[in-house]
């Protein structure tokens, strides 16, 4: 019999707030976390706004000395991991009642970009003061696998320990691969997700150079507007989304509170273009179908999709076409929303944060909205839950993540009853 996998802990750090409940409540209220950038001076850039995390205090999750040795993305990851650990009360150690063997607990937490601010600061220091003046912690601050490494060291997780790097699909891949690890009986429990902190001069400047970001500088809070006709690019966000996954029977034996079940996962490639999605969403179509097959579901079983929904002209139209191709007439009955409209695009952390939101939507019977959807786009004609959260009992949902390089990931989650 196939092993079942459930979510028992969650951790979120987003522009809507530090903490899962803060972010969740803000999404239900349709709050925008987007504003002018405060971390650096950006008057010369076409985009001077983003979804900064405003209330994060590293010392609430780690001591000051430890925090100084980490890049911000790693601090976010460790904090989200700590939240997920507290919520799950995961017992690691065979000496504990119903404890997990540390060798059967792993961590897969990724970052699309890694320690960009540490790279920028060290580069400036090297140019100004000499390359022999770099911090001995620079490399450790920059490399993305320090996020799972730090989590594994904190909780004595001696199983798999690695971080995928797959642009905007990073943390969805992390959760999917962690899910497979438990299904295939390689592990019994996993931390999984992603973290990102790329709101830096190079991060914003680089995406501006690609013309990927919104330039709606006169109204930052309405700039992220997925599926709206007036959308003009994505808005960068930051933060982390981490879950604790467990094998169902063990979780039940120890009396864990189960938030939702992960019941399917697929990953594939467009094999088409560095940044543009395949025409008609062809790669997404295949990924959605593979995810349904993985979960043993029919299209009619799905009630809600947390869309990739980036607020870019290409993505939103192609994702809509992909959903209509896969779901046919049922697409008209689906609820589809993009929480990027509120927290921005968290890049490598997006899939992790959105998986948490999807799990809570299933558990609590509330569907978060797509805000700023005021001018319907004829090419985007599904039910995007516009502007206001909706009470709805859904049994099965999907979370979509599609990234540069044509990399796709889809998670299927089920309400646990």
Image: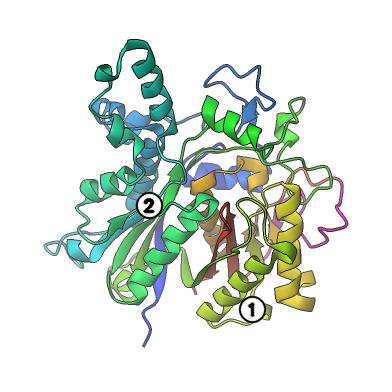
Q: Which mark is residue 85?
A: none
Q: Main secondary structure of the magenta part?
A: loop
For the question of whether residue 214 can be seen, the reply is yes
In this rendering, the answer to whether 116 lies above or below 328 is: above
At label 1, counting other C-alpha atoms closer than 10 Å, the crowd grade (few under 14, some 14-19, many 20 or more) is some
- Marks 2 and 1 sit apart, C-alpha to C-alpha, by 29 Å
Q: Which residue is mark 1?
A: 301
Residue farthest to the top? Answer: 129
Q: Nearer the viewer, residue 235 or 303?
A: 235
Residue beneath the point at 79% across and 77% down: 329
Sequence-first disc among 2 and 1: 2
For the question of whether residue 89 can be seen, the reply is no
Q: Is residue 158 left or right of residue 194?
A: left
Q: Is residue 3 left or right of residue 314?
A: left
Q: Quadrant of the N terminus?
A: bottom left
Q: Which residues are magenta?
A: 375-392
Q: Is residue 411 left or right of residue 329?
A: left
Colour scheme shown: rainbow
Which numbered mark, 2 or 1, is in the foreground of this view? 2
Q: Nearer the viewer, residue 358 or 114?
A: 114
In this rendering, the answer to whether 189 lies above or below 22 is: below
Q: Which residue is mark 2?
A: 109
Residue beneath the point at 63% across and 50% down: 275
Residue 47 pos. (x, y %):
67, 28
Q: Is residue 247 left or right of residue 116?
A: left
At label 2, counting other C-alpha atoms closer than 10 Å, the crowd grade (few under 14, some 14-19, many 20 or more) is many
Q: Is residue 391 magenta?
A: yes
- Quarter of image, res 48: top right
Residue farthest to the left? Answer: 95
Q: Is residue 239 magenta?
A: no
Helix, strand or loop at label 2? It is: strand
């Amino acid at each position: 019999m196939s092993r079942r996998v459930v979510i028992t802990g969650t951790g979120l750090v987003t522009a809507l707030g530090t903490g899962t409940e803060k972010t969740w409540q803000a999404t239900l209220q349709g709050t925008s976390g987007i504003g002018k950038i405060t971390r650096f001076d950006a008057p010369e850039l076409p985009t001077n706004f983003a979804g900064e995390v405003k209330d994060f205090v590293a010392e609430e999750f780690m001591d000051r000395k430890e925090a100084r040795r980490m890049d911000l993305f790693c601090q976010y990851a460790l904090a989200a991991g700590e939240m997920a650990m507290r919520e799950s009360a995961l017992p690691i150690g065979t000496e504990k009642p119903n404890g997990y063997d540390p060798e059967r607990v792993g961590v897969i937490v990724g970052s699309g970009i890694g320690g960009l601010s540490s790279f920028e600061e060290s580069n400036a220091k090297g140019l100004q003061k000499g390359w022999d003046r770099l911090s001995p912690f620079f490399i450790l601050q920059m490399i993305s696998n320090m996020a799972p490494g730090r989590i594994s060291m904190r909780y004595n997780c001696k199983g798999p320990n690695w971080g995928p790097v797959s642009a905007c699909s990073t943390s969805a891949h992390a959760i999917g691969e962690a899910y497979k690890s438990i299904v295939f009986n390689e592990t019994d429990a996993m931390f999984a997700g992603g973290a990102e902190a790329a709101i830096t001069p190079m991060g914003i400047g680089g995406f501006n150079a690609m013309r990927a970001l919104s330039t709606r500088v006169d109204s930052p809070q309405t700039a992220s507007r997925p599926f709206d006709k007036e959308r003009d690019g994505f808005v960068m966000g930051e933060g982390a989304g981490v879950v604790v996954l467990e094998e169902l029977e063990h979780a039940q034996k120890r009396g864990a509170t189960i938030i939702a079940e992960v019941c399917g996962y697929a990953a594939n490639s467009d094999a088409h273009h560095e940044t543009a999605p395949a025409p008609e969403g062809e790669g997404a179509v295949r990924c959605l179908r593979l995810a349904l097959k993985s979960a043993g579901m029919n299209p009619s079983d799905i009630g809600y999709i947390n869309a990739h929904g980036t607020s870019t002209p290409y993505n939103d139209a192609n994702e809509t076409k992909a959903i209509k191709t896969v779901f046919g007439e049922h697409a008209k009955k689906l609820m589809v929303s993009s929480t990027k409209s509120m927290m921005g695009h968290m890049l490598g952390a997006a899939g992790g944060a959105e998986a948490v939101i999807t799990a809570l939507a299933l558990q609590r019977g509330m569907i978060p909205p797509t805000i700023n959807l005021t001018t319907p786009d004829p090419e985007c004609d599904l039910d995007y839950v516009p502007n206001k959260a909706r009470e709805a009992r859904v049994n099965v949902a999907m979370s979509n993540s599609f990234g540069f390089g044509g990399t796709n990931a889809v998670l299927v989650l089920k309400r646990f009853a």
